[in-house]
Image (spheres, coloured by chain):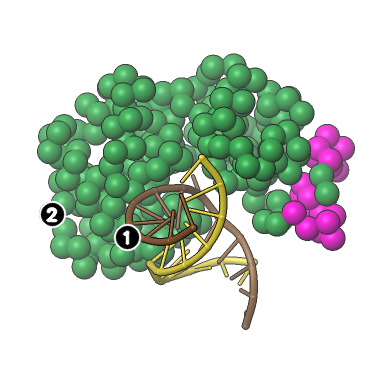
Chain colours: A green, B brown, C yellow
Amino acid sequence: MNSFKLYSILKEYFGEIGTWWPKDTSFEVVVGAVLTQQSNWANVEKALNNLKKISILTPKDIVMVPLDDLKKIIKPSGFYNQKSKRLKEMSEYILEFYGGDVKLLFDKDKKLLREELLKIKGVGKETADSIILYGAEKKEFVVDTYTKRIYSRLKIVEQKITYEDLKNHIINEIPEDLIIYQEFHGYIVLLGKNFCKKNNPKCGQCPLNPKCDYLKDNISLC
DNA sequence: CACCAGGCAAGTA
DNA sequence: TACTTGCATGGT
């Protein structure tokens, strides 16, 4: 299975998803990327809405709000003790080096931007790439747990493949295009939700639980 | 009741 | 380098 073929199948099945990462501001993507770590998006939205409700929208706002308050505000997204600290640290960084304007950071060269993001505590590879792809809107493909699970389950790559190797494998097979990068990752998330977490031979329902004849005809698993 | 959700950091070997 | 563990709410 070739990555562009997979992208095409998923696009035909799921249809247009457009900019599936919602945002009012660039900084909101940064916050969302941290809050979504090991948490589902519905709960992240609750946390984001809590922030918006009391007008906490900028790095400065995050720095100013007391830590214990911030914990309560983002509580629905889970892991609020460490996520609140991560938001604080990131906001302090953006405030100190970019005067609180995340767009100045996003203007930097893609490679430098990634290295810089990775130095910030709480920002690993997936979070950094999500921020670059959806916040800075630069062509940096995002590999997540679903991507790795799908690609290894489809026996396209070895299960033990590293983040960077899988990323390179994929970008070598698809056009270098911002929208395609964004869409493909979105489709992978949609497909990934329907994979059993463990490769259970008894499952027999992958790739999709619902009656998805089209995908079953085109992608065989289990 | 169990399991999962758009990971990361720190520790261990 | 590669694996383990803590972090934690809310939905199914």
The answer for which chain carries disc 1 is: A
- Residue A198: image location, x then y, percent: 70, 57
Prevailing secondary structure class for the magenta stretch in the rendered image: loop
Q: Which residue has dot 2 on it?
A: A64
Q: What residue range appears in magenta? A: A199-220
Q: Is residue A23 visible?
A: no
At 31% from the left edge and 36% from the top edge, which residue is drawn? A117
Q: Earlier in the sequence, mark 1 or mark 2?
A: 2
Residue A152 sits above or below residue A203 on the image: above
Identify the secondary structure beneath mark 1: helix
Residue A110 percent across, percent down from the top left: 36, 22
Please report, as a chain letter, where disc 2 is located. A
Q: CA distance from mark 1 to mark 2?
A: 17 Å
Name the kind of residue labelled 2 in the image.
Met
| Residue A128 rendering spot, x and y as whole percentages | 39, 37
Q: Quadrant of residue A169?
A: top right
- Asked if residue A201 is among those painted magenta in the image, a careful observer would answer yes
Q: Residue sitting at 31 percent across and 64 percent down?
A: A81
Horizontal arrangement in the rendering, residue A26 relative to residue A19 (left or right)? left
- Residue A76 visible somewhere in the drawing: yes
Front residue of A8 and A127: A127
Q: Residue at x 28, y 52 (%)?
A: A86
The verdict on residue A204 being magenta is: yes
Q: Of residues A112 and A52, which is closer to you in this image? A: A112
Question: Foreground mark, 1 or 2?
Answer: 1
Q: Mark 1 — residue? A: A82
Residue A24, image x, y percentages: 34, 39
Categorize mark 1 by other alpha carbons within 10 Å: few (<14), some (14-19), many (20+).
Answer: few
Mark 2 residue crowding within 10 angstroms, few (<14) / some (14–19) / many (20+): some
